Amino acid sequence: MDTDLQRIEQALLAAREAAAQFTPGRVASQKKEGGDPVTEADVLLDKILKEMLLRPSEGWLSEETADDLSRLKKERVWIVDPLDGTREFIEGICEWCISAALTVNGRPTAAGICNPATNQVFLGSREHGVTLNGRPVRVSERTELEGARILASRSEVRRGLWKRFEGAPFEIIPTGSVAYKLACVAAGLADGTFTLVPKNEWDVAAGVLLVEAAGGQWCAANQRRQFNQPNPRLEGLWAANPSLISKLKEISK
């Protein structure tokens, strides 16, 4: 394991330990500007990750840190979501995670995602592939949509956005955090995922690196491949193995 991946693993484990002081389902929350919820845990985990990962020469982009655009001049930038799936965390649903990715010149190179509720730690880099709790994993080898397990945003399903896929040949599995969905695709625990609403770089940077490092592919509707952009918004996202991704894009148009 290289030094960057070791740093990510150590930071995730420290954040997981800190998260243990909170009881999902019994956590007070507030509304941020824009209406998204935030908890004390989001802020604490952001602080821990920043202290353990960030070095003076590096940049930082996190959902819970005021954006410092000096990151745009940095070669190495951390893109972090300290608690992705805050709604599930508040409701006590075990589909939230801690997500961190290192990008070099806009390209994710190493990443980790930890789901403390399910005791899963996904780690990966382009050089070393992907592991789940220390075991090597790969994306699913399924080649057809028939019978495929497709992870859908739990909030999108609740809003009725997935009703048009109820007759599709694949199984729709509502799941919380998008980072966690991507990690599950990377580990072959599901066959694919896509989103019907925009996401931000911190939501997906770690997950898409894991998918690629595990032999899969991803794409965004705006075809953007570089991270650490002035505007971190991505217009939709698809991720699966190379055989399925084009079929998912076609059926979801």
Image (cartoon, rainbow, N blue to C red):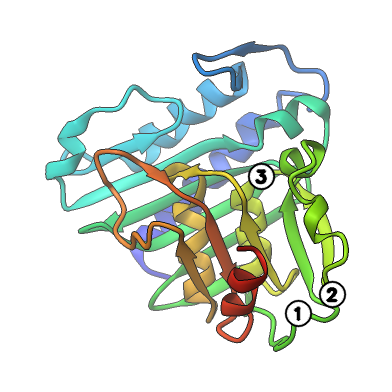
Q: Secondary structure at mark 3?
A: loop
The first of marks 2 and 1 along the sequence is 1
- Give how far apart the Cα atoms at labels 1 and 3 are: 23 Å
Of marks 3 and 2, the one in the foreground: 2
Is residue 156 rendered to the left or right of residue 65? right
Whole-percent x, y for residue 170 in the image: 82, 71
**At x 50% / y 54%, what residue is drawn?**
9
Is residue 211 rendered to the left or right of residue 78? right
Which residue is labeled 2 in the image?
169
Q: Secondary structure at mark 2?
A: loop
Q: Residues within 10 Å of mark 3 (few under 14, many from 20)?
A: many
Is residue 112 rendered to the left or right of residue 145? left
**At x 87% / y 66%, what residue is drawn?**
167
- Give how far apart the Cα atoms at labels 2 and 1 are: 6 Å
Which residue is labeled 1 in the image?
145
Q: Nearer the viewer, residue 6 or 185?
A: 185
Instruction: Tell me, yes or no, whether the two marked residues, 2 and 1, touch with CB atoms within 8 Å.
Output: yes
Up the image or down, 46 lies above or below 80; here it is above
